[in-house]
Structure formats: structure tokens, C-alpha cells
Image: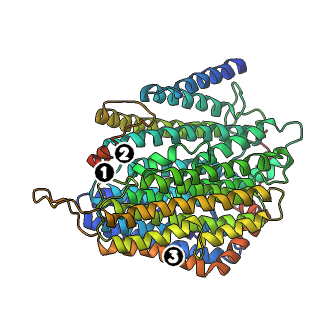
Amino acid sequence: MTHWLIAPILLPAMMAPFIVLAARYHIGIQRVFSIAGVLTLVLLSAGLAWATSDGTILLYQLGDWAAPFGIVLVGDRLSTLMILLTSVLALFVLVYAISARWDERGRHFHALFQFQLMGILGAFLTGDLFNLFVFFEVLLIASYGLMIHSGGTQRLRAGVQYVLFNLIGSTLFLFALGALYAETGTLNMADLAERVTLIGPDETAGIRIAAVLLLLVFAIKAALVPLHFWLPSSYAEAPAPVAALFAIMTKVGAYAIIRVYTMIFPTDLEATSGLHDVWLLPVALLTLIVGTVGVLAAKQFDRLITFAIIGSMGMVVVAVGLFSQEGIAAALYYIVHSTLAAAALFLIVDLVRASRSDLALEARPPINGAIPIAGLFFLAAIAMAGLPPLSGFLGKLLVLQAAFPTQSMIWVWAIVLVTSLISVVGFARAGSTIFWKAKAIPLPPADPDVPTQATEPATMSYVAVGSLVVLLALHTVLAGPIHGYTTQIAAQLFNPAPYITTVLETPGKLSDGAKEEDH
Amino acid sequence: MEFLIASAIGVLTAAGIYLLLRLRTFPVILGISLLTYAVNVFLFTTGRVVIGAPPVLRDDIDFYTDPLPQALVLTAIVISFGMTAVVVMIGLGAFLGSDDDHVDDQVTPSNDGEKEGAK
């Protein structure tokens, strides 16, 4: 057993207190350590992704306790892809936060950022549902701090909503875990996958309730309609780099849905039959509609992006909701795309905000650095709306292709195509209002008393946003190999037997004997 | 015993949900506290209600109670306690800043000016 698998969790967990305790008053040292930590994370997750890319399943037993008794971390293709995505995103977001000096506008930005990463990476790596709950809480409590970073009444109010909504979600999660434990006597995912198949046809009520409750919890995280109300105001009010990092948080919900509903409650499980096709796909399509209508209706630039995120989550879950290998493969391709695109858009909003009095979608005098910002927005918006040639288009194509042989094809095709058109219109309107019509508005007469003109954004800010856009372009150019890899991930998800045997049959303390049922 | 616990969970949950639906921060926080109490008791019973049995499984004991839910409840209590403290602090900050403790988004046309001030 190697210890590498726990390193992506331990590193930020050590880095955060170090930053608080040793570098509290030195923003420069904080920055150095924060960047170094995230760079190491990128290398670590790339290494882990490489190690699992051949289908190996890495297992780490905490305290060397054997699986159903101790907590395990499991690294398979899916979780290592997600941690790689998270750490790469975190790197560019952090570069932006430093260059735009967001980290100076309040205290403990870097420490909270590291704790946030610890929670997200832990949620992707854990193989135990209760541990997933704990990592959700870790990432949430760090996100509460980040969300209200640099303060302000409006931000605090949005923060209250965000915290309350997530507390309700956490409580629901506990109810779901309790129900699962009462039915099966275990919370280890692999063990659960084995035990739910043993439940007799007459005793499925409890497990069905647990499955639906869990789905609700993950739907809150993934901001599916009608549980999306927390997202627009909290993401719009959060500091821009934080909102960009939050782009991965909705994906944690999508990841959890993929993991739990392919392994523990697969579609062919009789105890929960009817759960997958009845609920998830219609809700996802509705989310797609609400998100894109929101893009068209938004009166503020930042709200527009938040609704675009809701729409893209709808798109992801449409693909997940097909519960076929093609669907999951398309969903994973789209998850990578939409995380990068959403993060880039949030940072672009911040570049615009730097020299604009507000973010209302009305023509205002030109902003500083309008040309590069407009170029970046143009590319990111093309990607997000799903126009060719960027990855959004390919992602949507893959989803449509996956939906083609299914019965719900007509709904998926109609709604995906129409909502794409709507979001193209929405983004075009926003872009032309902010960047083009600005030329027609004369600059207000210069007031010598008020130094209103903000300076041009720092070069590194452009580099950070530009790198995200370049990554999107790479995601497009390398679409063939990447989609091939996501197809392999989906194949691994639909064949959970190696995962389960790796987790349950690796020896550890207590692994001999004492295996009898609790009930 | 079972009836007592089940009805306690039910009453706590019902009261919690009622308070959650209120408009102002304080009742909502109280509602969340009640819900977390309910879920703590619920978690406690997930190992089945057994009275007077040792919590540890040994070879010569065939009557025991499941110790794991206690550990889960302990984690849940600590987390919900901490989270409630956080939400009280943030809620207090928001209330003192805006002199208003509504939970919902207020329709304020002057939204933008306020946001600028926040920066």
C-alpha cells in the first residue's frame, strides 16, 4: 500500500494551518506557499491520474483497517480525473486571485482556499459515504469563509442564504445516511453495493427512501431545478476567484450522482427500479431550460454567468440521466469543459467589473482593456453556449449522440438544441451590450477631483484567464483522446466488480473473521 | 420506547421544517437546529433500539448494540454545532450591515450602488 493516494488531501490540510500560523501577516509568503502547494497538487493528481489510467484501482486504508470497518480512499479513473481537473482549475484561479489582489481584500484567503481544496479533493477520493458527508462539510465550511471574503452587506446576505441552504442539504444528507445505515448496516460504498442487492423485494421501502433522499442531496449540490435557488445570488456575490473555484463545486454533486447511481444503485437494481428514468432526466431537462432562460433574462452580467452554470449543470445531468456508457462518457467530457468555461467567464466578469460602475447589462462607456477582455469573453462565451468550434459544441454533440438510441431522444434533442439557441442569443446580447455599444457612449467629462479611472488589469490576470481559454481549446483539439478516456472511465463505472473486490478483499486489520452481518 | 423516539423525531422534524419556512433569519436558524436534533436522534436509532446491552462485539456475547451510530452521531453533532455557530455569525453580520434580517432576496432597485459600496 502506497501513501500517495492520501497526499492530495494531506497537503492542503497541512498547508492551510501552516499559512494561518506561520505566515499570518506576510501576504507574500502566503502567496508563495499557496502557489507551491497547488502546483504540487497538480503534479500529485497528474501522477495519480497516470497511475490509474490503465484501469488500476488504488486503495488507501486509513489506519490500515480493512474496508467495511475502516474508512478507505479509492482512486479510480473517475476520481483521479476529477482531482486533476480541480487542481488545474485551482492553480489558474489562484494566479488570478493573486494578480487581481483579491487575496489582500480580506484575511485568510489562502488558508481557506487550501481547506476548500482539501474538502473537494477528499470528496472525490473517498470510498465511504459518511466520509463523503464529512468532506462535504469541510468544503462547505471553507466555502462559507471564502464566499464572504472581503465582506460587504450584500455579500453577507447572500452568504446567509448560501449557508442556510447548504445546512438544510447537510441535514438531509444525514437523514439519507441514517436510512441507508438502518437498511444495510454499512456506509462503505463498495460494501453497500453488495448489500443492497441482498434486500428482498418486500423490504425495499427504506432503501428507496434513502436512495431518493441521497439524490435530493446531490441535486442540491448540483443545483438542479427546483433546488437551484441558492446558486445565482451566492455565486454572483462571491468574490470572482471564489466563484470561479465554485465552478467545480456543482460538479461534486454531479460526481456523487455518477458514483452512487452507477455503483450502489445501478439501473438494473430491482430495489430502486424506476428511480433513474422517472426523476433525473426530466429534472435535468427542466434545469437546462431554466438555466438558459435565465441567461436570456438576466439583467446583470454576473447573474447571466450563474444561470449559464445552472444550464450547464442541466446539460451534464441530462447526459448522466441517460445512464448509459455513452451518456456518462459525454457527461464527463462536458464536466471538464463546463468547469473551465464557467471559471473563465467568472474571471472575465471580474475583469469587466474592475473598471465599470456596475454590472448591469446596459451600455456604459468603454472599459479599460476592452479589446483583450472582449476577445476572451467571445471565446469563453462560444465555448459555454456550445457554438462550434470549441468544446461546448463537441460536448453537446456527444450528449445528443448518446441520447439518439434512447426513447427520450426527441425530448433531449429538442430541448438541447432550442436552449443552445437561446443561450447563444443571451450571450450575444450581453457581449454586444458590454463591449460593442460601449463605443457609442461618450466618456463622462473627466472630474479631476475623483480618480475614478481604475488601472488596467494586471498582465497575470490575462494570463490566468487566457490559460483557461487555452485549456478549453486543448480540450477541443484533443477531444478524440479525451473522449476515448472518458469512455474508458464510463466502462470502468459500469463494471464495478474490480472496484468492489479491491476495496473489500484487500487485507488489513480485522480482515480475518468478524465478517458476519450486523443484523 | 420505539413510539416515544419515533414521535420525538417526527415532532422535531415537523417543527424544524415549519420554522425553516419562515422569512427571517432567526427562526430559520432555530428550525435548522431542531432539524439537526431530529437527525441526531434518528441516527442514534439507526443501529436499532437495544437496551442494556454492551456496545462491543466479543466472541462470547450474542446480545449487543451497534456502537457505530454513536460515532456517527458524535460527528454529526460536532459538525452541526459548528455550522450553526458560523451561520449565526454571518447572519449577525448581515443583519447589522443592512438592518434587516429577511432571508430571501429583497427586490432592491438600488442593488448596484450597495454592491459597489461593498467592494
Task: Look at discs 2 and 1 and give the one toward the viewer.
Answer: 2
Amino acid type indicated by mark 1: Ser
**Labels 3, 2: one chain:** yes
- Is the residue marked by circle 2 packed among few (<14), some (14-19), or many (20+) residues within 10 Å? many
Parent chain of label 1: A
Q: Quadrant of residue A31?
A: bottom left
The answer to whether residue A394 is above or below residue A353 is below
* Badge number at residue A150: 1
**Dot label at residue A376:** none
In front of the other: label 1 or label 3? 3
Q: Disc 2 or 1, which lies upstream in sequence?
A: 1
Instruction: Point out residue B64 in the picture as x, y percentages from the top left corner.
Output: 73, 33
Label 1 vs 3, first from the N-terminus: 1
- Look at the numbered discs 2 and 1 and tell me whether their residues touch, using CB distance below 8 Å: yes
Seen as rendered, the residue at the extreme front is A440
Q: Nearer the viewer, residue A286 or A260?
A: A286
Nearer-the-camera pick, A249 or B83 = A249
In the picture shown, does residue A252 fall above or below A227?
below
Q: Secondary structure at mark 2?
A: helix
Quick check: can you spot residue A107? Answer: yes
Query: Which quadrant would the C terminus of chain A be assigned to in this image?
Result: top right
**What label does residue A471 carry, if any?**
3
**Residue sitting at 39 percent across and 58 percent down?**
A240
Decide: few, some or many residues near mark 3? Use Cα within 10 Å; few <14, some 14-19, many ≥20: some
Q: Secondary structure at mark 1?
A: loop
| Amino acid type, mark 2 | Arg
Q: Residue at x 59, y 58 (%)?
A: A422
Same chain for marks 2 and 1?
yes
